[in-house]
Image (cartoon, rainbow, N blue to C red):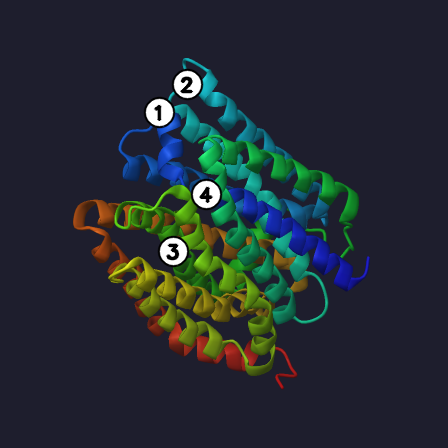
Amino acid sequence: MSTRRNRIALSGTIFVILLAQVLLYPGIDTLVVVFGGGEALRASMWFLAAEFAAFVAFAGLWGAASDATGRRVPFIVAGAVGGFVGYGLLGLLPTLDAATFGTALGLRILQGAATIGAFSLSITMLMDLDGGHGRNMGAAGIAIGGGTALGAPLGGQLYELGPLVPVYVAGGLLLAVAVVAAVVLEDDGTSTRREGFSAAIVRIRETPLLLVPYAFGFIDRLTAGFFALVGTLYFRQVFDLDPGATGLMLALFFAPFALLQYPFGVVSDRIGRTIPVVAGSTLYGVAVVGVGVAPSVGAAALAMVLVGIIGAMMAPATMALVTDLAPSSDRGVAMAGFNAFGSVGFLAGILVGGAVADRFGYVAAFAVAGGVEIALALIVLPVVFRVDRFETPSPRW
């Protein structure tokens, strides 16, 4: 397959995986009630946290296995099939009299453990392509942003048909990913066969500078997890929006986030990673706080658009920094590490945001989420300048 065709096919795969994931967010408080959850904020927090805990635990295993065999596609297919089974079992759970919310959390963990394989390795396979790291990560960013942008409003509308409808549709989308990946995608031999999991872990330890993009991935995804839970319930409770309207509010962030990532990725290939990553993260934190203090729905909507634009500036540059630093033979493990840190961040955003909102209210929760983004960006600033200066590939102009 040509590089361009591979890029399109992989972007489509990533798009559908994220679309399926985000379908559940706009009405998450109504979904956990069907599964037997109690208070909306806490039950929603644990339901979202279960999936991302699985992401953290299994992302490295999928990446190491892929690098060890020198293949990506079979693992993408297996992960997508596992995700389909997980969503399907969740959809059937309410029909079982003995089912509990604990059972739902267990199935959520299994579904997340499978889904992260398809997602992480699709991005890794995209990383393997020629054409510029910023360009390839920009394509990944468009797919991620596009899937989430469409998933939020579509999920809101699906909830209007029934609380389990988004779960069924998500399962069907994962099955479609498995079929398309098996038929269309081809391993090109870019990945190198590895000796095993231990060799992959050693490589990460031998490249400590990878912790720089990992740190930014952590704080960026922390705010994403925050919006998935606290932002959703904030719009639902403070502004009294239904799932459909809540999905549209989330889309105001995800739409510009999707549309602008590719051009910002190309720009980062030209000017380097420092400005998009550090300046973007700082402004992003300010914009997040702005959503939480918005006096009206209109003001909150405008702040969400700003969050999306700024997020599009920093996201592809952060992912491209991983490819700048990682050897081609170890990109599976390198991206798995990035996704693991990002998943920990998402998980932290859910747990910390939920805990702060529950105890101190929504304004305090938004202040914490935005403040952490700004503080960590400033702390890592000196290291980013050094990494960008010596590691960003030429030519830069």
Task: Check the picture and name the quadrant holding the C terminus.
Answer: bottom right
Q: Which residue type does callout 2 highlight?
A: Ala
Q: Is residue 277 left or right of residue 239?
A: right
Q: CB atoms at circles 2 and 1 under 8 Å apart?
A: yes
Above or below 391: residue 211: above
State how far apart marks 2 and 1 are (Cα): 8 Å
User: On screen, 5 above or below 91?
Assistant: below
Q: Position of residue 220 (x, y in %)?
A: 42, 61
| Residue 197 in view here | no
Residue 156 - label: 4
Q: Amino acid at mark 4?
A: Gly
Of marks 1 and 3, the one in the foreground: 1
Name the residue: 22% across, 44% down. 358
Name the residue nearer the viewer: 253 or 263.
Answer: 253
Q: Callout 4: few (<14), some (14-19), or many (20+) C-alpha neighbours within 10 Å?
A: many
> Can you give x and y, in whole percent of width and height, for residue 395 in the image?
65, 83
Residue 246 horizontal/vertical position (percent):
39, 48
Q: Which corner quadrant holds the N terminus?
A: bottom right
Give the labeled residue for mark 1. 36
Residue 129, quarter of picture: bottom right
